[in-house]
Image (cartoon, helix red, strand yellow):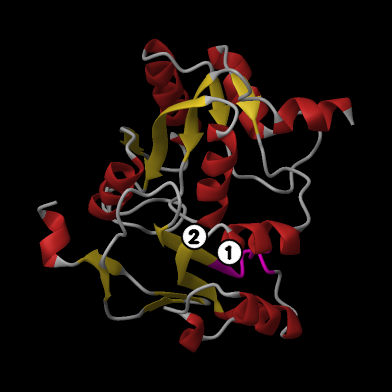
Amino acid sequence: MLELKKWKNGAKGHRFVLSFSGGKDSVLALYKAKQVGEAIGLLVMLEEEGKRSRSHGMSPGLIEAQAKSIGLPVYMAASSWRNYEKEFIHLLEKAKIHGAEALVTGDLDMEAHGCWHEKVTEHVGLRLGMPLWGMNHREAVKEFINLGFETIIVTVNLSLGMREDDLGRTLTHDYVEELEDRGIDPCGEGGEFHTTVINGPIFKFPIHVRKCEILKDGEYAFLPLALKDAQKNN
C-alpha cells in the first residue's frame, strides 16, 4: 500500500515530464499530475522513420498541435525497438537538464516492483509518478469522460473483439457500456484499441482533425488523423 501511494503521488511537489501517447490514459495522467506538480514537457517516442508515434501512430504534426494546445514543449525522438531504451533515457536526461525531477506515465496495470519505467528513472535520477496506477478501469474511463475530455478511437485490434466501424467513434458512457457488453476492457488495456485526445479541460483550444482513409495491417486497423488546414497555421 505504501508503494502504491508512493507511485501514485510521485509527482507531488515536483516538476515533471510526461510520457505522452496523445491518448486518453496519458492525458488523464497529465491532468491528475498537474494538480500536485508542475509539468515542464511531453516525452514522445516515434517509430524509426520518424513519421508517426510508436504507441498510437500519430503524426508529429498532430502531436505538436496537442502540445501547443496543452501549452507544453515536446521532447521527441525516433527509434527502433533495439535502441528504444537508450533514446528514451536520452530524452529523460534532456528533460532533467531542463528542470524535470520526475517522470509521469499513464500506466494503470504494472508490477509493483522492477517495472521498466522504474528502471529508467532510477538510471537518470528521477522520481516516478503513475497517478492512474491501480485504478479500476471503468472508473478511470468514467472520470476521463466526466471531466469533459474528447477522444477518438484511432487503432483497433480486430482479433480482440473490435471492429473496423469502431474507428472514429468518440468515447462516451453509452459507448463504453457497449464495449463492455462486447467483452472489451473499457480502457483497452488488453491492446484492443488506442485513442487520440482532441479536446478537454487542459486544452486551450480543440484540435480540429479530418479522418483519412482506414489502413489495415494484419489484425490491426488504423484511422490516420490529419490536421485541418486552418489549424496547421495556428
Which residue is at a point 90% across and 31% down the rendered structure image?
1
Which sits in the foreground, 156 or 63? Answer: 63
Label 1 is placed on what type of residue?
Answer: Ile
Please provide percent x and percent y for residue 223: 37, 74
Q: CA distance from mark 1 to mark 2?
A: 6 Å
Above or below residue 127? Residue 185 is below
Give the residue pinned by disc 1: 145
Residue 204 is left or right of residue 193, and the answer is left
Pinpoint residue 204: horizontal percent, then vertical percent. 32, 48
Residue in the picture at 28% in, 55% down: 62
In this image, 213 relative to 27: left or right?
left
The answer to whether residue 1 shows anywhere in this view is yes
**Does the image show residue 189?**
no
Please give the name of the residue rendered at 40% of the width and 40% of the height, measured from the top-left corner.
44
The foreground one among 29 and 200 is 200
**Label pair 1/2, CB-CB below 8 angstroms:** yes
Q: State yes or no: residue 102 in magenta.
A: no
Of 87 and 177, nearer the camera is: 177
* Residue in the image at 65% along x and 62% along y: 141
**Secondary structure, magenta segment, majority class:** loop
Q: Which residues are magenta?
A: 186-193
Name the disc covering residue 149, or none.
Answer: 2
Q: Residues within 10 Å of mark 1 (few under 14, many from 20)?
A: some
Q: Which image quarter: residue 117?
A: top right
